[in-house]
Amino acid sequence: MHPQPTGPELGASFIFAAMRRGFGGHCPKCGQGKLFQGYLKPLSACASCGEDTGRIYTADIAPYFTILIVGHLIVPPLLLTEQLAQPNLWLQAAIWPTLALLLTLWFLPRVKGSIMGLMWALGMRGHEQQ
Ligand SMILES: [Zn+2]
């Protein structure tokens, strides 16, 4: 178990460890229990340590960062391919949207888990303004 530090104990390594556990779909506190039931729905609590991870509300930040990442992975090779090879339009219309969809589906739960790990490490729950 990794107790949540506060104050000066809260360092970058602690934050990155929580984000790495979240990226892998595991509880940011213990790294053992699962973070999600199904694809994206957070479990109400960690089955291993009981941490209340289900109340971490990420809103739209996970799709935002997923779009940012996937866009940077898709657009440069797309433009480079067009500049160097000019493949048929139907081929590009088949490849790039499919690749973008697959990358989005792969990244979205991992980015959401990372954000949940970051928010957990910082003691944020996403309802601070309410
Ligand atoms: Zn846990």
Image: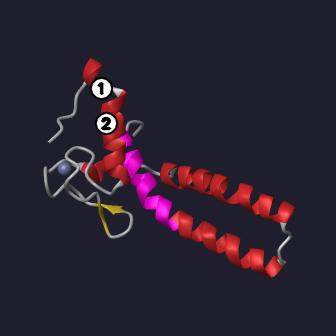
Q: Which residue lies furthest to the bottom in this view?
A: 90
**What residue sits right under mark 2 in the picture?**
121
Q: In which quarter of the image is the N terminus?
A: top left
Q: Which residue is drawn at 22% across and 43% down?
A: 29
Could you tell me the amino acid type at mark 1?
Leu
Q: Which residue lies furthest to the front in this view?
A: 84
Q: In this view, does 94 lie above or below 107?
A: below
Let me know if residue 107 is in the magenta part. Answer: yes
The secondary structure making up most of the magenta span is helix
Q: In which quarter of the image is residue 11?
A: top left
Q: Residue at x 33, y 31 (%)?
A: 13
Q: Distance between the residues labelled 2 and 1?
A: 8 Å
Sort mark 1 into few (<14), some (14-19) or many (20+) by Cα contacts within 10 Å. Answer: few
Q: Which residue is drawn at 28% across and 18% down?
A: 8
Q: Residue at x 30, y 33 (%)?
A: 14
Highlighted magenta segment, given as a residue range: 105-127
Residue 129 visible in rendering: yes
**What residue sits right under mark 1 in the picture?**
10
Q: Which of 92 and 114 is in front in this view?
A: 92
Q: Helix, strand, or loop for circle 2? A: helix
Contact, mark 2 vs mark 1 (Cβ under 8 Å): yes
What color scheme is it? Answer: secondary structure
Q: Which of 118 and 72 is in front in this view?
A: 72
Q: Helix, strand, or loop for circle 1? A: loop
Left or right: where does residue 93 sit relative to residue 85?
left
Could you tell me the amino acid type at mark 2?
Ala
Left or right: where does residue 120 sit relative to residue 62?
left
